[in-house]
Amino acid sequence: MKNFLIIAASLLFISCSSESPKDGALVSVKKIPEITVNDYIYTLGDVIIKWTAFKHSAKAQVGGKFMSAEVKGFTESTNLSTAISGVTFKIPVASTSTNDKVRDYKIVNSFFNTMVDTDSISGRILSIDDNGTGKLVIIMNGQEVEKQYKWEMDLTSKEIYLKTSINVLNWGAQSSLDALNEVCLEQHTGPDGKNVLWPNVDITVIVDL
């Protein structure tokens, strides 16, 4: 991650006599200049997209991420809303990574590749608000769904975290979910003997600004 340097004015040190001034004597006081900090300009750095899916009745977590994403429409600005609102993104589904090549193959081929427009997930940021929320659109399986997300920023690193949860059934992906569950039947069967693959997925997008 790149580091950003904030330019600040230098401090003016004042030397003082240890002796107290005599009554009636004039004392010269130097005013310390205000420290001015330039407005920070948001620039687009690395983008990391992580997701967490759930299996078994107890909702055991399965974590993964997309190794690449194409982002367009970012505007360098001192205003976060100006910089991010209107940004579009495209995520190649073939970049899926769970640190298990067999599982990655099953997710890409049995889940994503059974959808309409299988090459990528796309969308755009509609808004980002000062209260830590915003709206975006996600396009998957040929369907466009608007979602709300929450965000927070690390003021030191200037990394912003966008978080949302989706239900893939809202994108008409029941058959794709069933296809993935079928090829992962053993892995999705929990200690209680029940085969469960949840349609819910938590998503976190980390952007270096």
Image (cartoon, rainbow, N blue to C red):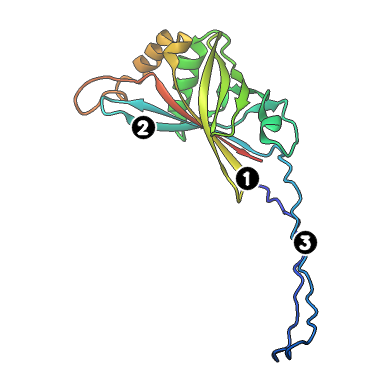
Q: Quadrant of residue 25?
A: bottom right
Q: Residue at x 40, y 22 (%)?
A: 200
Q: Quadrant of residue 74?
A: top right
Task: Name the secondary structure under disc 3.
Answer: loop
- Left or right side of 152 for 79: right
Q: CA distance from mark 3 to mark 1?
A: 21 Å
Tell me the kind of residue under disc 2: Gln
Q: Residue furthest front?
A: 24
Q: Nearer the viewer, residue 48 or 44?
A: 44
- Left or right side of 159 for 41: right
- In primary-sequence order, the first of circles 2 and 1 is 2
Tell me the kind of residue under disc 3: Ala
Tell me the kind of residue under disc 1: Lys
Residue 33, numbered label: none
Task: Name the secondary structure under disc 2.
Answer: strand
Residue 67 locus on image (x, y percent): 58, 32
Q: Is residue 13 above or below residue 102?
A: below
- In primary-sequence order, the first of circles 2 and 3 is 3
